[in-house]
Image (cartoon, rainbow, N blue to C red):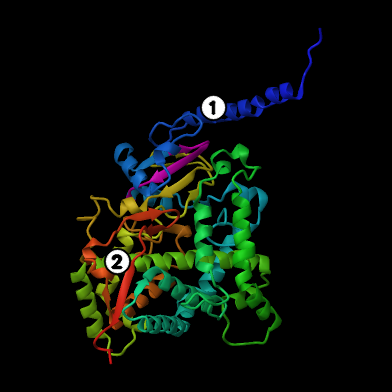
Amino acid sequence: MGTIFTMQHIITFLIPLPLLFFLFRIISNRRSSNKLKLPPGPYPWPIIGNILQIGIKNPHITFAEMAKVHGPLISLRIGQRILIVGSSSIAASEILKTHDHALSGRDVSILLRNKEPTFHNMNLVFTSECDDGWRYLRNIYKTELLSGVVLESRANIRESKVLEMVKYLTSKEGEDIIIKDVMFVTAMNILGNATLSIDLVDYEGNGVGAGIMDTVRRLVMIVAKPQLADMFPVLGEWDLQGWYKQVMHIIEHELGAIWVDSIQRKRDDRSSSSSKDFVDVLIEKGFTNRQINPVMEELFAAGTETTSLTIEWFVAELLKNQQVLKKTRDEVMKHINGDIVHESDLVRLPYLDACFKETLRLHPAGPLLIPRKATQTCEVMGYTIPKDSQILVNVWAINRDLSMWDDPLTFKPGRFIESNLSYKGNDFGYLPFGSGRRMCPGETMASKVILLTIANLILNFDWFVPDNVNPMEINMEEEMDIAMYKKEPLHVIFKLNKRFAN
């Protein structure tokens, strides 16, 4: 009697085939990688690797604990992919200096690489490799937006935006303020004027950029979400979690809609003006809207979140450490005579700068920096780092290394007084902005904005925690996706300094 094949039989037969192929690929990859001398690390589970051991919350802390057991350079598996984590100054130096070229790729999701092979290469941070296009764009950043000459020429704009923040807080004197929200608007408008010569949003949330804070936050959270396609590249053809669709909608339709009209007005009005902003320069150099959009998305996503959250941590640490706050206030009051601190005044405030450095040490905006990718196989600290491995540098762990820092868990700005340590990327025991060719390009602008903001808050206001809460009891619990956030937003009451009160 002949066999009858129903549709159910056919489906039952076919379904295991891709699964068997999938498992065969995983086992083959594991066997080939076992022949390599990878850095040590916890034993991976079959198929899923070390995903469960890492968990989903605060991986920088988990990696630091793993480093205590396995050493300063460890390897893990995220599905099929190899992950390398360096957690010491020596490991950081090897990754970011000695092998900077080989490990300077950017770990861009396979979904973007497959579906939008050019889109992710139109900005600076997430360009896959440091190729000619990346160098061309970096040069534009350095000469037209972030050079010393350009920053100095626009100091008055940054000062005016900070003064607007002071006036707003004065109007809200005695009220409960979520400090991060106010600082986000300040950072947004400083960047908006540098790139488009406009304010994007006011302190009441109105303007062409209304809702941009929530949009940027959603984008960062989505980008930080682990993707099955990246863990298992054989799935790279399918957007199984809808990640690609969400990311592209935010970039092209939500964020892109904020500045599309402003860009078009600039294209329509090509009158020669001596005062050109960054978008004017991009248009002059022939950039299309499709090229400008990812550049703007990168600038606003990276330049607003990190600035506002660092200011929040800065204010929280000063409130918790009242003697440090008093010493900082004494320095500001001694050297500033008027009612505003100018950027040119900051060189006279070394203790404030030390407080900033200490804030960055304890609360680096990017605890693991932005993930790198090995563009070629190389040897680091005697171990093989295979091509296409994802590379992380745990600066959070390095900043708490007992062999590097005295009493590392305590906020002690004095450690930076008369110290040559800087955040310029040359000291591999202190890398809040990273190092090497992938170092944060906006370090100089960010440091100016943060110091200027804090100095003016100190000069103009006395700070209090609402509900008569003891500042020592401020919850400093942190939470991380790409950046490190204060889990509980900081609420502050600002009251005009008696020196300025009527």
Give the residue furthest to the left. 323
Nearer the observer, 329 or 117: 329
Please give left or right for residue 189 compared with residue 413 in the image.
Answer: right
Question: Circle 1 — which element?
Answer: helix
Quick check: 23 left or right of 407? Answer: right
**Quadrant occupied by the C terminus:** bottom left
* Span colored in magenta: 76-89
Q: Residue at x 49, y 61 (%)?
A: 217
- Say above or below: 322 vs 250: below
Residue 366 vertical placement versus 75 (above, below) = below
Q: Tell me the number on the disc at residue 51.
A: none
For badge 2, the amino acid type reads Ala
Give the residue type at disc 1.
Ile
Query: What number is the disc on residue 316?
Result: 2
Image coordinates for residue 375, horizontal then vertical, percent: 54, 47
Q: Which mark is residue 27?
A: 1
For residue 102, say whether it is visible. Answer: no
